[in-house]
Image: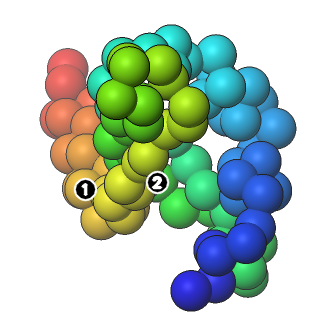
Amino acid sequence: SDLLGRDASTLHPPQEWQRIRSLDSTHAGHLTTKIIRKTGELVDIAIFLSPLRTSDGEVIGSMGVAVDITTQKQAERALREREERSSP
């Protein structure tokens, strides 16, 4: 509900928004990026995108689902750091 009516560009750091906008909107796809919470905190997310088409196949928009992957990214970073410390 916090996102309804908000311009998606205000949810992402500028460099991430440019990367998202550069995606090919005619094909489904996914990417990982960051989003800015109301508190200003950056959160890791995975976005899954699909084009919205008319019955004639014309692309008229896109639909996306975002999943918070912050915990997964934190675990990956911790594992990398542990592996780096244990490497000779």
Q: How many marks?
A: 2
Vertical relation: 22 (above or below) 43: above
Q: Are marks 2 and 1 in contact (CB under 8 Å)?
A: yes
Residue 61 sits in quarter: top right
Left or right of 8? Residue 78 is left
Residue 72: numbered disc: 1
- The x, y position of residue 85, in whole percent, is 27, 37
Q: Which residue is mark 2?
A: 44
Q: How many angstroms separate mark 2 from mark 1 (CA)?
A: 9 Å
| Secondary structure at numbered mark 2 | strand
- The x, y position of residue 23, in whole percent, is 54, 18
Q: Mark 2: which amino acid?
A: Asp
Residue 32 seen from this side? no
Residue at x 50% of width, y 13% of height: 24
Q: Mark 1: which amino acid?
A: Gln
Vertical relation: 13 (above or below) 29: below
| Secondary structure at numbered mark 1 | helix
- The x, y position of residue 30, in whole percent, is 34, 31
Left or right of 59? Residue 66 is left
Residue at x 33% of width, y 41% of height: 48
Render colour scheme: rainbow
Q: Residue furthest front?
A: 56
Left or right of 39? Residue 25 is left
